[in-house]
């Protein structure tokens, strides 16, 4: 072998190694880039507003993120299965008013059920969970058995659930809850209970999506629904379970909401479904289906929580915050589209 040939081979090998390195770096950025975005936001906001990094404010961000973060966990399963659920905000309101009506103290000035004494907190919690599970399962059933697009089915449920919440309450808020219900929105020492509930839901969703046959079916349905059917996946049953879980997450969020706010209005949580979708999308869950992670949804929710809190500390009006959030959603979807276009 001549020295020139050896040099050419060495150059080719170096070029190959460099390309491999670039590919690995690119893959890492695609997978964990959202964490860099979160760190960048924290650095920028804390530089402008040093009190952002105070322990009180950090726990405040985590508490604020817990409600739509819990909703985003259910939305992760839905979008990973190549679906969408725009009813979860209304389901939260309906579940919330049902729980609130059963969690009132007997001495409440406007008691929903005047003959009821103070009830154990487990009863309003179970009632809320059943309502959320039922609404979500109906969504899944409509999609599975009628072939209605997920957007249309959940749009209908969004209107129905909101209407039921208004009928149930007569359009009035329900408040004055028992101490046990209010405890869910409080702290244990310095640690917020809503964050604890959020962590439990993260663990449950992580196990479901990553370590059960149900989780594998979610990815299979999102990747190729026809192939999933051929391989023996009961698509109809799994769609009901997927949307049922999204409704269940909305119900859990409603319980946290009631405990934090101390009152539930039938118009509550309007637009929360968009925030849940945004958190999921920002976290890397693909609207093309088959791609989604629990940690991505959690980080996505934190990005929105940090951004909202930071803009509030900087005195930016809530209207502008909505515009920024909308732009972030569009950018996240465009990035997802470009990523999938390159794969094809």
Image (cartoon, grey):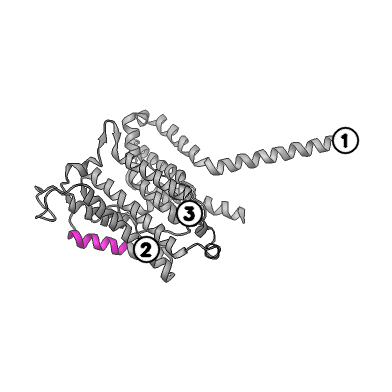
**SS category of the residue bearing label 1:** helix
Q: Name the residue tied to disc 2.
A: 139
**Relative vertical location of residue 222 with respect to residue 185 in this rendering, above or below:** below
Q: Residue at x 30, y 41 (%)?
A: 194
Q: Position of residue 151 (x, y in %)?
A: 41, 63
**In magenta segment, residue 160:** yes
Q: Residue at x 53, y 62 (%)?
A: 228
Q: Position of residue 242 (x, y in %)?
A: 41, 57
Q: Give the mark nearest the N terminus, 3 or 1.
A: 1
Dot 3 alpha-carbon crowd within 10 angstroms: few under 14, some 14 to 19, many 20 or more: few
Q: Position of residue 91 (x, y in %)?
A: 30, 57
Quote the CA–CA distance across marks 3 and 1.
Answer: 57 Å
Is residue 300 toward the left or the right of residue 334 in the image? Answer: left
**SS category of the residue bearing label 3:** helix
Q: Give the mark nearest the N terminus, 2 or 1.
A: 1
Which quadrant of the structure image shows residue 54?
A: top left
Q: Quadrant of the N terminus?
A: top right
Q: Quadrant of the C terminus?
A: bottom right
Chief secondary structure of the magenta portion = helix
Q: Name the residue tied to disc 1.
A: 4
Q: Mark 3, mark 1: which one is toward the viewer?
A: 3
**In magenta segment, residue 70:** no
Is residue 76 toward the left or the right of residue 185 in the image? Answer: right
Q: Which residues are magenta?
A: 158-170
Relative depth, front residue between 221 and 214: 214
Q: Residue at x 33, y 46 (%)?
A: 67
Is residue 242 toward the left or the right of residue 197 in the image? Answer: right
Question: Cβ–Cβ below 8 Å for labels 3 and 2?
Answer: no
Q: Name the residue tied to disc 3.
A: 213
**SS category of the residue bearing label 2:** helix
Relative depth, front residue between 60 and 333: 60
């Amino acid at each position: 072998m001549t020295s020139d040939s050896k040099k050419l081979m060495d150059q080719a090998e170096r070029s190959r190694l460099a390309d491999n390195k670039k590919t690995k770096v690119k893959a890492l950025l695609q997978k964990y880039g959202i964490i860099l975005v979160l760190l960048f936001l924290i650095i920028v906001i804390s530089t402008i507003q040093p009190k952002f990094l105070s322990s009180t404010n950090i726990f405040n961000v985590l508490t604020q993120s817990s409600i739509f973060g819990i909703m985003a966990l259910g939305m992760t399963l839905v979008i990973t299965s190549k679906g969408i659920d725009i009813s979860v905000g209304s389901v939260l309101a309906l579940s919330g008013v049902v729980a609130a009506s059963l969690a009132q103290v007997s001495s409440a000035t406007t008691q929903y059920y005047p003959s009821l004494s103070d009830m154990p907190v487990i009863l309003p919690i179970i009632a809320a969970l059943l309502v959320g599970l039922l609404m979500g399962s109906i969504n899944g059933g409509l999609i599975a058995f009628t072939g209605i697009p997920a957007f249309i089915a959940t749009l209908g449920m969004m209107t129905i659930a909101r209407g039921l919440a208004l009928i149930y309450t007569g359009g009035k808020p329900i408040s004055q809850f028992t101490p046990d219900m209010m405890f869910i929105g409080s702290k244990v020492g310095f640690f917020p209970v809503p964050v604890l509930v959020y962590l439990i839901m993260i663990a449950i969703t992580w196990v479901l999506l990553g370590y059960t046959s149900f989780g594998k079916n979610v990815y299979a349905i999102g990747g190729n629904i026809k192939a999933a059917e051929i391989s023996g996946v009961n698509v109809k049953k799994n769609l009901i379970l997927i949307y049922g879980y999204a409704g269940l997450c909305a119900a859990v969020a409603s319980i946290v909401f009631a405990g934090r706010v101390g009152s539930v209005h039938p118009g509550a949580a309007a637009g929360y479904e968009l925030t849940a979708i945004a958190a999921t999308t920002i976290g890397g869950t693909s609207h093309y289906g088959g791609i989604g992670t629990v940690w991505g949804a959690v980080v996505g929710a934190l990005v929105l929580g940090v951004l909202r809190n930071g803009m509030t500390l900087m005195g930016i009006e809530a209207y502008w915050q909505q515009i920024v959030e909308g732009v972030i959603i569009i950018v996240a979807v465009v990035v997802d589209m470009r990523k999938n276009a390159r794969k094809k």
